[in-house]
Image (cartoon, helix red, strand yellow):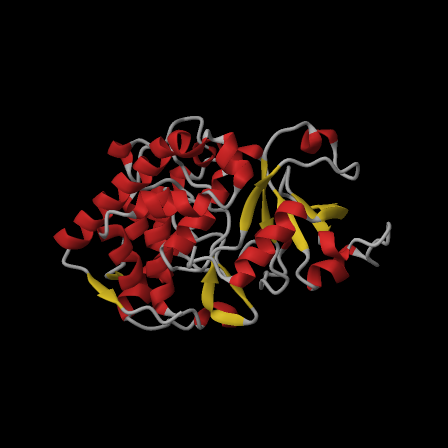
Amino acid sequence: PLWLSDDDLQKMRLLAGGRVVSKVHVPAHGQVLRVGLQAVEDVEGDVLPDSLEVDCQDGRCGLIKRSTDLYEVLAFHLDRVLGLNRSLPAVARRFTSHLLPYSYTNGSLRPIIWWAPDLQHLDDANNDQNSCILGWLQYQEMLQSRGPVPLAGDAPCSGIARDEWSRLALFDFLLQVHDHLDRYCCGFQPDPSESCVEDMLHEKCQNPAEMVLVHILVRRSAPSRLVFIDNAGRPQHPEEQLNFRLLQGIDSFPTGAVSTLQSGRLQSLLLESLHMDQELWESQGGAEGLRPLLRTISRRAGVLLQYIQEHNLRVFQDFL
């Protein structure tokens, strides 16, 4: 497919077939492992890399996540089909390496996401999944001001282009990803079993001044562009509970993505793209098995287009 670049395909091949040569647990992230990968064509005997860090700086690492995060692979393909190009390559894979714990090699399918070596992380161990700290009110002020708002001590994020938030909002709405712009589940009535309720985050909806955005990341090589991570979203999220808070303050959307949504071809384009990931394709029962999920995304696209029309929102040209 034209929307997958040569670089995407190369990284997908590494993730899908690279030999696991090292591993390290990601602190405070439960079942997430960062692994060093050796491309099949690079395998010469059993020569192991000097260290995981060296390997990762060379772009030969991936994050193996939980089976329940498998929709991150769909999210990657949606990102590319829409021409957003903000998420990191991801594939579905079954692991057999003796270096991995049994729970990773028991035949279950897991997503592995390319690890970008130059993601900008805060030094704070409790807040390492952000490039900057951005409060909800500050974010809304930034959207309304039509320009960057100076962020005290947060140089990495003050340069994020305004259009980036439009891309993120569109992407998150289609997938119903709440864990960037609405980790508190303020935009819908969460089930009591939701982590935002169990962790008592939902209570903060009464006090917007305490609310912050999460997983807001940029790369050192492109500090004006967001990198979308943790994109599994909620395929089963009920249609009558769609989270419109994700769109709050956004007054324009990228024309390329909107055109694709309007074309009526979103499902067929996604099927063509997902077919590139044979493990995922077969595990979901091929096109027939994937259609219910893609219909859900397509219906959300229709709701978003209606929202854009009703609110008379504009589109902007993409400059990737």
Image check: 46 left or right of 19?
right
Q: Position of residue 122 (x, y in %)?
A: 59, 61
Q: Nearer the viewer, residue 298 or 29?
A: 298
Image check: 37 left or right of 143?
right
Q: Quadrant of the C terminus?
A: bottom left
Q: Is residue 292 visible?
A: yes
Is residue 128 placed above or below 66 in the rendered structure?
A: below
Identify the residue at horizontal 14%, vertical 54% (top origin).
309
Identify the residue at horizontal 40%, vertical 38% (top origin).
202
Image check: 92 left or right of 176?
right
Is residue 31 placed above or below 261 in the rendered structure?
A: above
Identify the residue at horizontal 43%, vertical 48% (top origin).
273
Q: Quadrant of the N terminus?
A: bottom left
The image quadrant that residue 257 belongs to is bottom left
Q: Nearer the viewer, residue 87 or 138?
A: 87
Identify the residue at horizontal 47%, vertical 50% (top origin).
76
Q: Is residue 210 visible?
A: no
Q: Position of residue 88 (x, y in %)?
A: 52, 55
